Every structure is written in C-alpha cells, then in structure tokens.
Amino acid sequence: MRKPLMAGNWKMYKNAGETTAFFEKFLPLVAGSAHADVVIGAPFVNLPAAVAATAGSKVEIGAQNLFWAKEGAYTGEISGPMLVGVGCKWVIIGHSERRQYFGETEETVLKRTLAALEYGLKPIVCVGERLEERESGSTEAVLKAQFDGGIAPLSDAQFGLITIAYEPVWAIGTGKTATPEMAADAHRYLRSLVAGKYGAEAAAKTRILYGGSVKPDNVKGLMAQPEIDGALVGGASLDAVGFASIVNF
Ligand code: 13P
C-alpha cells in the first residue's frame, strides 16, 4: 500500500550543464517506472535547470535544505517560497551532513520542516545514528531523541505530509550498507514511534526511506524488506544509468 519513493541526493555535485545532461539520459530510462515516485535533490543553483529538464516527466525536484523565514536579512539563505517559485516540490531536511558540519539540531530540523509545510514543500526528514552510537547500543535512543525533538511536535495533519529517511551515518558514503535486516529493524522501531504518537493508521501510511551506500547491486535486497519504502541515494544517484537501475529495482 505504500508506493516506493526513490530519491537521489546529489549533495554538492554537478553544475547546470551536467544537470541537464543527466536528465536527458535518465528520463527515458524511468518513463515507464509507474511503480515508484522519483525525486532528485539538486543543489540550489541547479534547481531551475533540473525543473526545466524534468518538465512533463514523472520526476519531481527537491532542494537539500531551506531556511525557515519567509524572507529577510539572512545573508546566504534560501526560503521556502523561493524554492516553490522555481518549481521545487520537495526538500531534504536534517541530513546528517548538515547535522555534522552546519550545526543542525532537532530544534532547527523542526523549524525547517514546519516552514517547508507552510509553503507547500514535501519534507524528507532524515534521522540516523553515528557509528559510536550504534556500537554503544544507543541506536534506538538516538532515533527516539531525533523523532521526539524534530518530528513529534508536528500535528497529525502536518505529520501526514512528511517522509522519513533513516540514514545510519556510518553507512553514508562508506560503502558499508546496513544489511536489509538491520535497516528493517531500525525502520520497525521508527514506525513504532510513529504509531505511539500518531496512531496505527498513520504508521501504516508513512513512507520510511533507507539511505546509506544504496547501489544498483544491493537495492533489491533492501527493497525486499516490507519495512523499507524507498531509498535516499547519494553517490549512486549521480549516474543516470545507475540511478535508473536503482529506481527500477
Ligand atoms: P551515499 O548513497 O553516497 O552513501 O549517501 C547517502 C546519503 O547521504 C543520501 O542522503
């Protein structure tokens, strides 16, 4: 009942020309992929090129962050209305790289998510434990703190509009994927938190994506887990043929 969502996170890669070239190759490969929703999270400056290249296709475009104010004296920031204005539909929020390098906290994740919803963007909210947290057995405590602080203050209606991405930090860009069973355990735990706060029906509807070294050769095993509703793909989303084969797992 949950339609898979296959999302690419391009991080700080590709220029406008490379963006257009990617979609020229990619779109024909996923034109028939009715089984999944497809999103690409592009760098801010390439959003117009990405939106133009995907016009009339099934692929929707997302940003990788936003600031929560509508406008104002916030040098260097980008607002929700600016993203909507260039045709962006989605936004990735709270990615571990933003938590690690740019001071993202539960509080700012929540503010960004509320702003995204206010301006009509669909948030993909990222959670996940670091290696030392997994090794010390505190994965569930970390996920609970991230859920309680960054997500659970949302109203039922607001929560119904978000997607959660579970990205174990130790699996990002390292080639170390969580095994399908490890990912499914974390997804089950997150879904239990959703059920506890928003009820069983909301828990059954919420899409929880897995992210962390998803590749064409491991996506099938991950997607075979009923708990895993899609993928948030970094490195392997940069290649049109590779990402198309992930979409078409
Ligand atoms: P990799 O797929 O490169 O490990 O990155 C995952 C990620 O951070 C997606 O948001």
Image: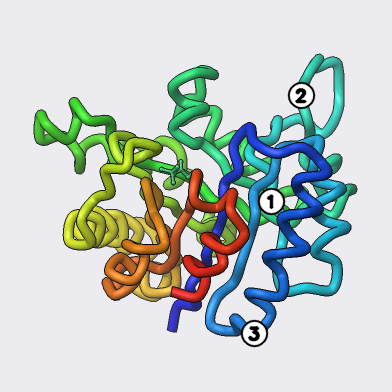
| Rendered location of residue 206, percent (x, y) | 44, 66
Q: In the structure shown, which secondary structural element does the residue marked by tag 1 occupy?
A: strand
Which residue matches tag 3? Answer: 32
Which residue matches tag 1? Answer: 62
**Quadrant in which the N terminus appears:** bottom left
Q: Is residue 63 left or right of residue 127?
A: right
Query: Counting other residues with Cα less than 10 Å from the Cα at mark 3, is it few (<14), some (14-19), or many (20 or more)?
Result: few
Q: In the structure shown, which secondary structural element does the residue marked by tag 2 occupy?
A: loop
Which of the two discs, 2 and 1, sits closer to the camera?
1
Q: Amino acid at mark 1?
A: Gly
Query: Which is more N-terminal, label 1 or label 2?
Result: 1
Q: Nearer the viewer, residue 238 or 231?
A: 238
Q: Amino acid at mark 3?
A: Gly
Q: CA distance from mark 2 to mark 1?
A: 16 Å
In the rendered view, tell whether residue 213 sits above or below residue 195.
Answer: above
| Rendered location of residue 9, percent (x, y) | 57, 46
Q: CA distance from mark 3 to mark 1?
A: 21 Å
Residue at 58% across, 61% down: 161
| Rendered location of residue 3, percent (x, y) | 50, 77
**Which label is found at residue 77?**
2
Which of the two discs, 3 and 2, sits closer to the camera?
3
Q: Quadrant of residue 46?
A: top right
**Quadrant in which the C terminus appears:** bottom left
Callout count:
3
Q: Amino acid at mark 2?
A: Glu
